[in-house]
Image (cartoon, helix red, strand yellow):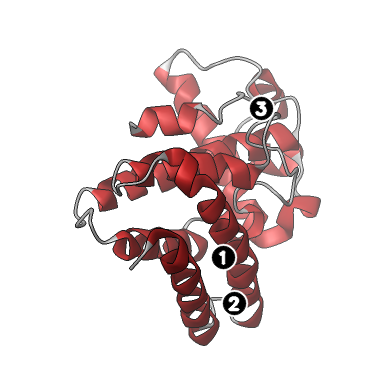
């Protein structure tokens, strides 16, 4: 499965209209960048369209041309983060031995950790649950969107069908989500002991399902 297909499965665009000119597209990107910075500073509850517009250097009316409210801005930001995640996963998969499933899963966790530490706003909204459990796709939970994309990617690397790996991956994602949140509550950079324990637990669980 290609990167684009993995991403477009999740997309129900929050934009009022798509920017067709390069200048408009850059303006939208500035709005998303501004919202990411502000999420780190004030959180989702403190975020407003006025603050986003001011930080992006645009009029509020310009923001409303593309987004009806702050939820839509964060929804678009979350889609962008998902695209970055899937792109990074695809790039990493191209460098790994497909026969070693743990290297694949370990890499996915490491990519998530890097995004949590380095991508503005990601630590506050992740893939959208703080806003809406179905922010990425109104038909599926945010975690299910991630699970479906990962199952497609991983099934192409290991000798198992997507149907065989969806449930184990779903359980691993839910467990990792909770444990990594715990790690970052303890330490803003992610408590390394909790992260190591989370990886060990997930590896043991998946080894029972996928084999060593």
Q: Which residue is mark 2?
A: 183
Crowding at mark 2 (Cα within 10 Å: few <14, some 14-19, many 20+):
some
Task: Determine which residue is flagged by label 3.
Answer: 63
Q: Disc 1 designates what residue?
A: 176
Which of 133 and 55 lies nearest the eye of the viewer?
Answer: 133
Q: Position of residue 112 (x, y in %)?
A: 46, 59
Q: Tell which circle, 3 or 1, labels the residue nearer the N-terminal end.
A: 3
Q: Are marks 3 and 2 in contact (CB under 8 Å)?
A: no
Q: Is label 1 in a helix, a strand or a loop?
A: helix
Name the residue at the bottom extreme. 193
- What percent of the width, then of the height, locates residue 7? 46, 32
Residues at marks 3 and 1 touching, judged by CB atoms closer than 8 Å: no
Residue, x 44% and y 63% (percent of image)?
Answer: 109
Q: Which tag is nearer the camera, tag 2 or tag 1?
A: 1
Q: Which residue is drawn at the image coordinates 46% and 67% (left, top)?
A: 208
Structural crowding at the residue carrying mark 1, measured as other residues with C-alpha within 10 Å and reported as few (<14), some (14–19) or many (≥20): some
Q: Is residue 196 visible?
A: yes
Q: Which class describes the residues within 10 Å of circle 3: few (<14), some (14-19), or many (20+)? A: many
Q: Quadrant of the N terminus?
A: top left
Alpha carbon distance from label 3 to label 2:
36 Å
Give the residue drawn at x 45%, y 44%. 151
Work out whether mark 3 precedes mark 2 in sequence or the reverse, and give the earlier one: 3
Answer with the quarter of the image where residue 42 lies: bottom right
Residue 57 appears in the rendering = no
Between 131 and 142, the residue placed more toward the observer is: 142
Q: Residue pushed farthest right? A: 45
Mark earlier in primary sequence (2, 1):
1
Q: Is residue 33 above or below residue 207?
A: above
């Amino acid at each position: 499965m290609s990167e684009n297909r993995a991403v477009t499965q999740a997309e129900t665009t929050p934009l009022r209209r798509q920017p067709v000119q390069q200048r408009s597209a850059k303006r939208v990107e500035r709005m998303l960048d501004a919202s990411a910075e502000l999420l780190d500073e004030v959180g989702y509850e403190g975020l407003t369209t006025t603050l986003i517009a001011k930080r992006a250097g645009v009029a509020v009316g310009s923001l409303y041309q593309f987004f009806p409210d702050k939820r839509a801005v964060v929804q678009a930001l979350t889609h962008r983060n998902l695209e970055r995640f899937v792109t990074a996963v695809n790039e990493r998969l191209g460098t790994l031995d497909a026969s070693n499933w743990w290297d694949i899963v370990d890499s996915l966790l490491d990519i998530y950790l890097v995004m949590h530490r380095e991508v503005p706003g990601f630590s506050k909204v992740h893939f959208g649950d703080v806003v809406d459990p179905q922010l990425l796709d109104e038909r599926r939970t945010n975690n299910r969107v991630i699970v479906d994309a990962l199952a497609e990617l991983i099934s192409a690397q290991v000798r198992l069908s997507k149907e065989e790996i969806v449930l184990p991956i779903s359980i691993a994602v839910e467990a990792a989500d909770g444990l990594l949140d715990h790690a970052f509550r303890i330490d803003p950079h992610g408590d390394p002991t909790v992260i190591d324990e989370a990886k060990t637990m997930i590896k043991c669980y998946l080894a029972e399902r996928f084999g060593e």
